[in-house]
């Protein structure tokens, strides 16, 4: 990169001398503006040379992210100088247009200088642009912009000289004004880009691409945060992903390496840091809730523990049984204490809701009343067989406690290859549907067995 910057410095020096000599000899404001522009380019290129040398230094204890932002500082200084030059050129052009017209000669050497300038500018702009993209160097890209601006403004000067040759001397000042407008616009655009990098402004498109790439990695359950900052054209990305807490450490490490790889694909050259946070699985959460409830002797049974995942955290709902003769106030206080303990022991939980149920007396006996509830039996079979996992529900037993509450046990068949998790989900859906549609049914037990079991 340093060699490219030095060659550009030499090219800028040659153009300064040529344009200045031709401008002084012809009296052309456009040519003198071009000479000043090239002089500024030479200073900017010299600044780029030193910025590139600083930026190439490796990270150290005081600069853990490296020295890449030296290039962005250089680019910002260059754009400020360009803007000042554009203001000066505009001022001189307006004075010539509104005052006495200056004497301008469209000499052959003025045309020759501008022709050579266009060739040199085109060559250097292309080399610098390619080098800037290859090395992701903002400073080299800024230099490429300068030589591109030189190329276009040289063309404007040529056009102005042609008009001067045909007796329109004000065309020279108008060319200078056009140069001022173009240089001013480009300096603002490049300056804004440099400020964005120095202020660590993250492009939304880049963040969205990184988040999408990380979320697509197998094993990543959630992308909790993505941040990116640029230094000298190199992106530095911090990604926080959620992985199941039951995943082994070695597997979690493999997932993070894959996240780093896919991020590097969407942001070439990125320095990626992946932080893993464990996510609680629903089954693991249910076990933890039951264990916490077991520490509270006044809560006799906890079941139907459900976890739902929301942006603000995990919501837990559960059913807890209390003695039937306990007052609502006392049961509510116990339930609130249990909910607070669950939220304290499981930090991810932000809400707990408890459904209160009466505990049956241990001395209660149940009577088989299946024959008296043939319609209920048929309805239970319909509910069970509406689940995609259930092939058939071949037996439903109905019993009644002394207090009149009904309990149902149903035997259902499913394919032998189905997982325990899938049968559990189906059982939960059946139980919830029965409790919702038939309030008189207090307990539902679903027994699954493989199809064809004798």
Image (cartoon, rainbow, N blue to C red):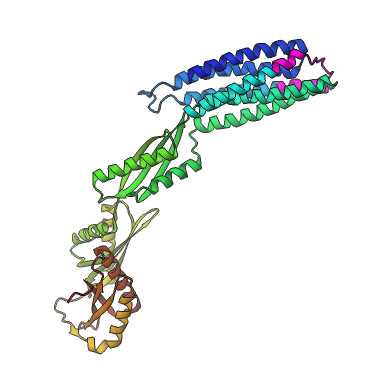
What secondary structure prevails in the magenta region? helix
Image check: 160 left or right of 44? right
| Residue 293, percent from left and from top | 22, 61
Residue 414 drawn above or below residue 401: above
Q: Quadrant of residue 40?
A: top right
Image check: 44 left or right of 295? right
| Residue 272, magenta (yes or no) | no
Image check: 444 left or right of 233? left
Q: In percent of the image, x 25 and y 89: which residue is there? A: 372
| Residue 394, percent from left and from top | 24, 80
Towards the viewer: 339 or 262:
262
Residue 375 drawn above or below residue 434: below
Q: In percent of the image, x 55 and y 23: which residue is there? A: 127
Towards the viewer: 417 or 188:
417
Report the magenta residues as a range: 89-114
| Residue 183, percent from left and from top | 66, 26
């Amino acid at each position: 990169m340093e060699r490219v910057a030095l060659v550009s410095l030499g090219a800028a020096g040659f153009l300064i001398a040529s344009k200045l000599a031709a401008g002084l000899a012809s009296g052309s404001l456009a040519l003198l503006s071009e000479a000043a522009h090239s002089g500024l380019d030479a200073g900017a290129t010299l600044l780029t040379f030193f910025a590139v040398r600083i930026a190439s230094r490796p990270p150290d204890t005081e600069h853990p992210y490296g020295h890449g932002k030296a290039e962005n500082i250089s680019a910002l200084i260059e754009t400020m100088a360009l803007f000042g030059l554009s203001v000066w050129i505009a001022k001189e052009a307006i004075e010539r247009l509104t005052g006495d017209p200056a004497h301008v000669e469209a000499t052959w050497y003025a045309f020759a200088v501008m022709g050579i300038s266009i060739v040199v500018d085109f060559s250097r702009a292309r080399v610098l642009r390619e080098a800037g993209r290859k090395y992701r160097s903002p400073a080299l890209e800024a230099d490429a912009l300068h030589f591109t601006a030189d190329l276009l403004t040289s063309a404007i000067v040529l056009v102005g000289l042609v008009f001067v040759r045909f007796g329109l001397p004000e065309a020279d000042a108008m060319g200078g004004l056009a140069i001022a407008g173009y240089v001013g616009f480009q300096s603002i655009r490049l300056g804004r880009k440099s400020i964005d990098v120095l202020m660590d402004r993250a492009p939304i498109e880049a963040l969205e691409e990184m988040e999408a790439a990380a979320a697509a990695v197998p094993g990543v359950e959630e992308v909790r945060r993505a941040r990116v900052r640029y230094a000298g054209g190199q992106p530095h990305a911090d990604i926080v992903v959620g992985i199941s807490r039951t995943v082994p450490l070695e597997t979690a490490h493999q997932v993070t390496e894959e996240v780093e790889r896919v991020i590097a694909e969407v942001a070439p050259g990125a320095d990626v840091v992946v932080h893993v946070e464990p996510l609680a699985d629903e089954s693991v959460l249910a076990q933890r809730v039951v264990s916490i409830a077991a520490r509270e002797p006044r809560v006799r049974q906890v079941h139907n523990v459900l976890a739902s995942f929301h942006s603000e955290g995990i919501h837990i709902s559960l059913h807890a049984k209390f003695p039937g003769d306990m007052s609502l106030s006392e049961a509510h206080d116990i339930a609130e204490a249990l909910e607070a303990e669950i939220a304290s022991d499981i930090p991810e939980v932000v809400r707990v809701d408890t459904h209160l149920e009466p505990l049956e007396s241990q001395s209660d006996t149940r009577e088989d009343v299946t024959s008296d509830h043939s319609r209920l039996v048929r309805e239970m079979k319909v509910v069970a067989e509406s689940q995609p996992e259930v092939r058939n529900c071949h037996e439903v037993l109905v019993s009644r406690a002394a207090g009149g509450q009904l309990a149902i046990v149903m035997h259902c068949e499913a394919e032998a290859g189905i997982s325990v998790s899938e049968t559990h989900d189906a059982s939960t859906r059946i139980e919830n549907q029965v409790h919702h549609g038939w309030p008189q049914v207090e307990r539902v037990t679903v027994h699954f067995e493989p199809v064809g079991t004798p």
